[in-house]
Image (spheres, grey):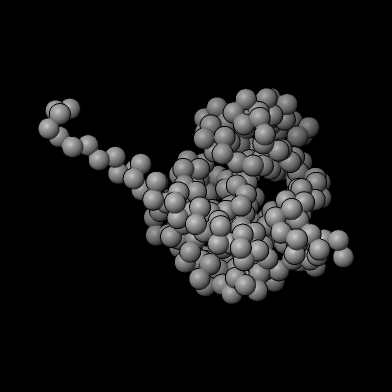
Amino acid sequence: MRESIKLIKVKEAIQADNDALAEALRNELRKRRIFLVNLMSSPGAGKTSLLLQTAAALNKSLRVAVIEADIDSAVDTERLADSGVMAVQLQTGGFCHLDVSMVRQGLDSLDIDALDLIFLENIGNLVCPAEFDTGAALDVMILSVPEGDDKPLKYPLMFSKCDALIVNKIDYLGTGLTDFSLDVLSDRVKKLNPDIILFPLSCRTGQGMQDWVNWLSEKIGTFADLFQDRFEK
C-alpha cells in the first residue's frame, strides 16, 4: 500500500468503541447490583433449555429475566414466557452478534432495578458473538455432544474468552451414536483457556444441572452482599 494512502481499520475501531461502552455498562450494573450473564452457542445446542432449568432453580432466591436475541424469530421468547420466565425479544435483522448498544435496548425494555440476574441469550453462532464484549459479568458457552469434540480447534476465540463451558446432551454418551470424548474436549479447551470451568450436563435428564447452578450461585453470591444474603436465607 502506498504511504500516501491512509488505512482505517473499521473493525478495530468499532470493537474499541464497543469495549469502552461494555466496561461502562459492567460498572453501572455492578453498582446497581445486577448480574448479567452472556450465554453463547451454536444453534440447537440448548441455550433456551438451559435457561428454563436454571431460572426454575434460582427463582426462589433471585429475580430473573432473559434478553433473547435472534436474527428473525420470537419462538424461544415465547417458550420462556409460557414457562413464566420474564423475557424480551431482540430481533437483530441480520446482525449475527450482540453488542453493547443492542444489549442497552434490551435492558431499557426491562425494569432492571426490579431484577437481580439477567441472561443474554446471544445469537446462535460460534464466530461473531465471541468478538464483541456485551458488558456481562460472565461469558458462558454451551457445546452439545452431537457437535463434536473438535470445535475448540475450529473456533478457538470462543473457547478462549469464556469463563465456563457447558457440555450439554451428555445423555448421548455411551449410546454408540457419537465418538465424542469429554477428556479430549477438556484437553483441547484447557490448552486455550486453562482457567475455564467445564460442566457436563443434560438439560433433558437434569444430570449435572445442580453443579452448574451451584457454581453460578457462588459467582453471583460473591458479586454483591445482597445476593449472598439471599442464598444464606
Q: Position of residue 183 (x, y in %)?
A: 73, 26
Q: Between residues 20 and 217, which one lies in front from this camera angle?
A: 20
Point 45% across, 49% down: residue: 19
Asked which quadrant contains residue 111, the reply is bottom right
- Residue 178: image x %, image y %? 69, 31
Instruction: Please give the name of the residue rendered at 74% of the width and 41% of the height, measured from the top-left corner.
Output: 199
User: In this image, 187 relative to 174: left or right?
Assistant: left
User: Residue 43: x percent and y percent?
Assistant: 55, 48
Compared to residue 111, the image places residue 49 above or below, namely: above
Is any part of residue 179 visible from this angle? Answer: no
Q: Is residue 191 above or below residue 233?
A: above
Please say whether residue 175 is visible from this viewpoint: yes
Q: Quadrant of the N terminus?
A: top left
Tell how many labels: 0
Q: Residue furthest right?
A: 233
Pick the residue in front: 46 or 140: 140
Q: Is residue 76 left or right of residue 85?
A: left
> Position of 137 compared to 167: left or right?
left
Q: Between residues 207 and 219, which one lies in front from this camera angle? A: 219
Where's the C terminus, which quadrant? bottom right
Residue 24 x %, y %: 49, 57
Which residue corresponds to the image point at 70% horizontal and 55% vertical from the top-left? 223
Against 76, residue 196 (above or below) is above
Q: Nearer the viewer, residue 161 or 165?
A: 161
